[in-house]
Amino acid sequence: MRPSLLSTTWVIARKDLAIEFRTRTAFLAVLVFAVLGIATFYFAWDATAVAAIDLAPGVLWVIFTFSGLLSLQRSFGVELADRAMDGLLLAPIDREAIFLGKALANLLFVAGILIVTVPSVALLYNLPLGRTLPILFAIALIAAVGLVAVGTLFSAMAANTRLAELLLPMLSLPFFVPIVYGAAQTTSMLLAGRPVAEAWPFMKILIAFDLVFLTACTLTFPYILEE
Amino acid sequence: MTTRALPDDGDEATLVNAGVETRPLFDWLFGVAVAAMVAAYVRAVFFTPIEALQGAAQKIYYVHVSAALSAYLALGVVALMSIVYLWLRDERADRLAESAGEVALVFLTAVLTTGPLWGKPIWGTWWTWDARLTLTLFLWFLTAGYLVLRGAVDEPAMRARYSAVIGILAALLIPFIHLSVYLFNTLHPKPILLKPDRPSMPNEMVVTFAGFFVACALLCIALIRARYRYGLARDAVRAMDAASAEDE
């Protein structure tokens, strides 16, 4: 009897997280990259011309997208060593479970980055987060699901090409535009103290994006791994 | 690659069997398309009245809108052929998607060049983040990414599967980009020709536009067809190379 989709998904995710937890290289590197990026933005900013509250959502989401790309690169990159991918393909599990497991591990990875970057932006740009923090994290998580779904699929694709490092951002960034747009607009509305209901149209785009691309990427993923 | 001798009669037979024309034939459809384009330009420049408010700049409309519609046509072929390929696994669908993708990039580039040329005198700006401009720009990025991906995968079946997946996902993305930018206000002219009541253009201009549109679509189809034939010949030569490499 084949193990269920959910349990195999969790096994794959746990495998990726165990690798990451034992080596700890990628997570720390991406974290440093993210905070460094946030700090670098500060030097390209004229505080007298643009208020921090106007700049910060853009900084947060651009940096988050780029550090997300760095972590996604790793997702299928690790399977290239010792041809680990072949072992994964030989395992008696659904291809969809490989995708969902990888995506889940990436989601947790990216959520870890968010837990550090959101307070970093708030601290370095003096943002009055306060009560908006929980809802900000919720929006970040909704945005991260779509980002990870598309990114995991493209990471699998890019790992097998000659231009892997260049191709992943080139393919992914157009797909991240609705995510960055929705997330940044919602963030700036919340920071400006506007009611959550006003940000609802943008949140609807994010949720629809998650649903459409999580489904589409799960369904098309088996075509990527065909031999 | 370099060891391959010039094709002798035997090779030519292989090519003919593969359905490839070995002699460069005159591409009559391309000839017709170019002639139609020339005629459309002559009519638009010399025999169509100058618009009262916008002056000569309005004439860019003919080539701009025609090129945009042709680009959509080509992109529609890419999306459709991507689905067909994953369904039927027919390499002809992949080759057609590849050809249409390259031609779409050419027409999108034409749209993105003629647009600012018109925008500067009429809107007073080369570029604005208007809904349709943004969408066209991202169609250009997606098409370029699609073609770069094709170039980065060597194995034909893998390349076909990868690019088909991208083709389908890109088609799904378009409504999202459109929706995102639509929440901004649009500066773009509203439809002039295809609207419920009568077109708000004099008949002479409608005829010029119709001619331009047909010529542009014809050029688009002729280019896709020529590119498809090139792909056919290239794949046949590669197959011959692979076969002769196995013999040695």
Image: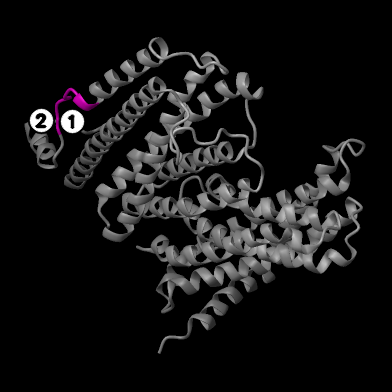
B62 or B164, nearer to the observer = B62
For residue B23: magenta?
Answer: yes
Badge 1 crowding class, 10 Å Cα cut-off, few under 14, some 14 to 19, many 20 or more, is few
Q: Residue at x 58, y 51 (%)?
A: B179
Range shown magenta: B21-29
Kindly indicate whether the residue at mark 2 contacts the one at mark 1 (C-beta within 8 angstroms).
yes
Q: Secondary structure at mark 2?
A: loop
Badge 2 crowding class, 10 Å Cα cut-off, few under 14, some 14 to 19, many 20 or more, is few
Q: Chain of mark 1?
A: B
B10 or B122, nearer to the observer = B122
Q: Main secondary structure of the magenta part?
A: loop
Q: Secondary structure at mark 1?
A: loop
Residue A24, can we see it? no
Q: Chain of mark 2?
A: B
The numbered disc on residue B8 is 2
Report which quarter residue A193 is drawn in: bottom right
